[in-house]
Image (tube, helix red, strand yellow):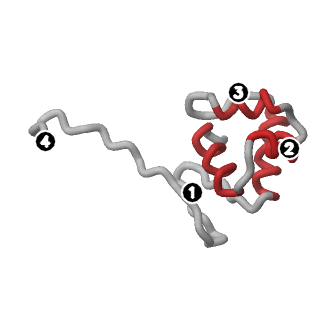
Amino acid sequence: MITAAQMRAARALAGIDQKTLAERAGVSLPTIQRMEASDGVVRGVVDTLMKVIQALDEAGVELIGEHQTSERGGRGVRLKPVVPPDPKAEPA
């Protein structure tokens, strides 16, 4: 699974715009736009998702899933877990 935020970050790391990703994946630009505008996990046809992931992989981006480690090394980004605020904490 890939999240919309991962997809946007992966595209940014690869230095490509939505149109270029669409062309490389063989999908339409509106499909990429819809995927990136999703909330959370991108939903869609499995074949389309696989094409996008393959295009990102070929662009040199490794997608790292939740609780997964990167075994290839190299630079990357990962979101920190969201920690809810402590309701007992004093306001700053």
**Label ID, residue 34:** 3
For mark 1, give the secondary structure.
loop
Residue 26: percent from the left, percent from the top? Answer: 90, 40
Residue in front for this viewpoint, 70 or 74: 74
State the quadrant of the C terminus: top left
Mark 4 Cα shell of 10 Å, populated few (<14), some (14-19), many (≥20): few
**Label ID, residue 17:** none
Please report the residue visible at 62 percent of the width from the left and 71 percent of the height from the top: 74
Q: Distance between the residues labelled 2 and 3?
A: 15 Å
Please report the residue visible at 83 percent of the width from the left and 35 percent of the height from the top: 48
Residue 44: percent from the left, percent from the top? Answer: 75, 28
The kind of residue on which mark 2 rests is: Ala
Q: Dot 4 corresponds to which residue? A: 92
Q: Pointer 1 and pointer 3: residues touching (CB < 8 Å)?
A: no
Q: Distance between the residues labelled 4 and 2?
A: 47 Å
**Label ID, residue 25:** 2
Q: Distance between the residues labelled 3 and 4?
A: 38 Å
Residue 88: percent from the left, percent from the top? Answer: 12, 36
Q: How far apart are marks 4 and 1 (CA)?
A: 35 Å
**Label ID, residue 68:** 1
The kind of residue on which mark 4 rests is: Ala
Mark 1 Cα shell of 10 Å, populated few (<14), some (14-19), many (≥20): few
The kind of residue on which mark 1 rests is: Gln
Q: Pointer 4 and pointer 2: residues touching (CB < 8 Å)?
A: no
The kind of residue on which mark 3 rests is: Arg
Sooner in the amino-acid sequence: mark 4 or mark 1: 1
Q: Which of marks 1 and 2 is in front?
A: 2
Sooner in the amino-acid sequence: mark 3 or mark 4: 3
Q: Nearer the viewer, mark 4 or mark 1?
A: 4
For mark 3, give the secondary structure.
helix
Sooner in the amino-acid sequence: mark 1 or mark 2: 2
